[in-house]
Image (cartoon, coloured by chain):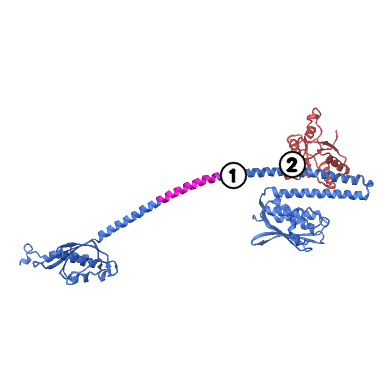
Chain colours: A blue, B red
Amino acid sequence: MASEDPFTTPDFRLLFESSPALYLVLDPDHTIIAVTDAYAQATMTRRDGILGRNLFEVFPDNPVDPHATGTRNLRESLDRAVTGRGSDTMAVQKYDIRKPEPEGGGFEERYWSPVNTAIFGKDGNLAFIIHRVEDVTEFVRIKRQGTEQGQILEELRARAGRMELEVFQRAQEIQEANRNLVAANADLARSQEAAEAATRKAESAAQEFEAFSYSVSHDLRAPLRTIDGFSMLLMEKFAPALEPAARDYLVKVRAGTGRMAALIDDLLELARVSHSPLALDSVDLSRMAGDISSRLGESHPERRAVFRIEPGVEAKGDPRFLRVLLENLLGNSFKFTSRKPEAIIEFGQVREERKPVYFVKDNGVGFDSRFVDKLFGTFQRLHTEAEFEGTGIGLATARRIVHRHGGCIRAESELGNGAVFRFTLENE
Amino acid sequence: MNDKYILLVEDDPNDELLTLHALQENRIRNNVVVTRDGAAALDYLFSTGPNEGKPLPDLPQFVLLDLKLPKIDGIEVLQALRKHSRTRLLPVIIFTSSKQEKDMINGYRLGANSYVRKPVDFTEFAKAVKELNLYWMVLNEKAPGQA
């Protein structure tokens, strides 16, 4: 049994099929006639499943890969091997293989490095084609990974580059910002200087004003006191010698000095509320209005006046100024209700657009609303001195105070039907 | 020497005359010593300057002090009075035309006992002088140890 003697006649089919390399043997029509175990394993096929079948029927293109060129390339290579009567080494091919149904079916991505060799018989005709492949999928993957890593690296480099650029730009920006900052600091220093200069100027103006008002307050009043005092002494000491007309004239002289003194005081007050700096604090306006009302009531105990003061009205402002404001408004109401059998004067607040609006309201003679524009002007009066005495400065002062607090003041009235003054203090 | 008296420090002769009139009118015949500037007031009280060598006078019942004065102004007079132990507790009433906040604050801060603004209206003026006199001359008890 020569065939059973491994030394004389080796079993070539067994040897071939056991080869660790991946081989297919095709006949000239590309029918598979032999296959190594390794090939079957690598292509997830079984020998009995592919023997006798056409190569391209067993290994069709992956239908889901639109770029699959495997079958075409393979066919061309086989032809070249035959035509060239030798071997044809193909470039690495992507040639996906069909997975068996039990493993989920579909195709698995594979890369192959094939070599096709045409074998001719003694008659010179094509006998077989040996199709040898190496599964380079892993290699391609690694390479691709390498590529990917390279790409990542490249990406990183690019990003690093961009960052470098960005860092550079940032640095430039920072430098620019620093330059601007330096410039801004210089500006600030300059504006601080300017502000200090302005403050000094304001201070010196305030000092000048102080000196001025001091002098006005002292020196303008002293002669008035002299005029008034000696007119009075004339009337008292020389009463028998004075004719009634002379006495009447002296009364007028004294009235004039009184009015002049009131004007000086009111003008000083107006100047003060215009020039003095504000010292803001929270102010209990209700309490302030209460104090002022008591004092007004005490000044004319013969009058019937009801003050209705809403409790708990608070505001932020300069307490000294707000006192002057309320003194003027409440004093006004008190004055213009003097002919009512019962004066009713109210103070309170309402909310308009969620902002407090304070009001002083009375049932006095009111004013003709056609002249409301003149009401707050300096020395403007809507009543004659004979009707109601006054300097015409009080409401100008009130308005100045409100304006200095960033608010506004308005008045409404119907002649004979009382008046209401409303004001806001916007700094709240 | 004179028992109770007022020291009036006043540079304006008209105001001086009106003050004296007001005091007379109220039938309170007090002695009034008048000095016409701050320096004269201090020289009088401490026997200095022209009064050098004179014995120290008894202290007045109170000082009616104007603020705007020649040489040494009212505030400086007040400061000097409060510095000396002899006059530290002497009642000083600032009696001035000014209602300047600064004057009032300074006056009280430096130890003025009262601050009264001279009214322009003589009726008011006379009333103020009378009330001041009544309070400080008659009702007020001087601090113990004050001459």
- As drawn, which residue projects farthest toward the top? B53
Chain ID at mark 1: A
Q: Residue shown at 69%/54% (left/top)? A: A402
Residue A134, horizontal then vertical, whole percent? 21, 61
Q: Secondary structure at mark 1?
A: helix
Could you say which quadrant of the image residue A49 lies in? bottom left
- As drawn, which residue projects farthest toward the left? A1
Amino acid type assigned to the residue bearing label 2 in the image: Gly
Residue that numbered label 1 is attached to: A192
Image quadrant holding the C terminus of chain A, namely bottom right
**Does A177 lie within the magenta span?**
yes
State which region is magenta: A164-186
Image quadrant holding the N terminus of chain A, namely bottom left
Could you say which quadrant of the image residue A59 lies in? bottom left
Q: Is residue A308 visible to the viewer in this orientation of the structure?
A: no
Residue A354, horizontal then vertical, whole percent? 64, 61
Report whether A425 appears left or right of A141.
Answer: right
Q: Is residue A123 visible to the viewer in this orientation of the structure?
A: yes
Report whether A124 appears left or right of B68.
Answer: left
Residue that numbered label 2 is attached to: B107
Residue B143, horizontal then vertical, whole percent? 78, 39
**Does A226 lie within the magenta span?**
no
Q: Is residue B102 or residue B129 the one in the foreground?
A: B102
Whole-angstrom CA distance, mark 2 to mark 1, is 36 Å
Report whether A56 appears left or right of A371.
Answer: left
Q: Is residue A51 above or below residue A245?
A: below
Amino acid type assigned to the residue bearing label 1 in the image: Gln
Please tell me whether mark 2 or mark 1 is closer to you in this view.
1
Give the class, few, some or many, for how many residues have Cα within 10 Å of label 2's Cα (few <14, many ≥20).
many
Residue A168, horizontal then vertical, whole percent? 42, 48
Report whether A53 appears left or right of A386.
Answer: left
Magenta: main secondary structure: helix
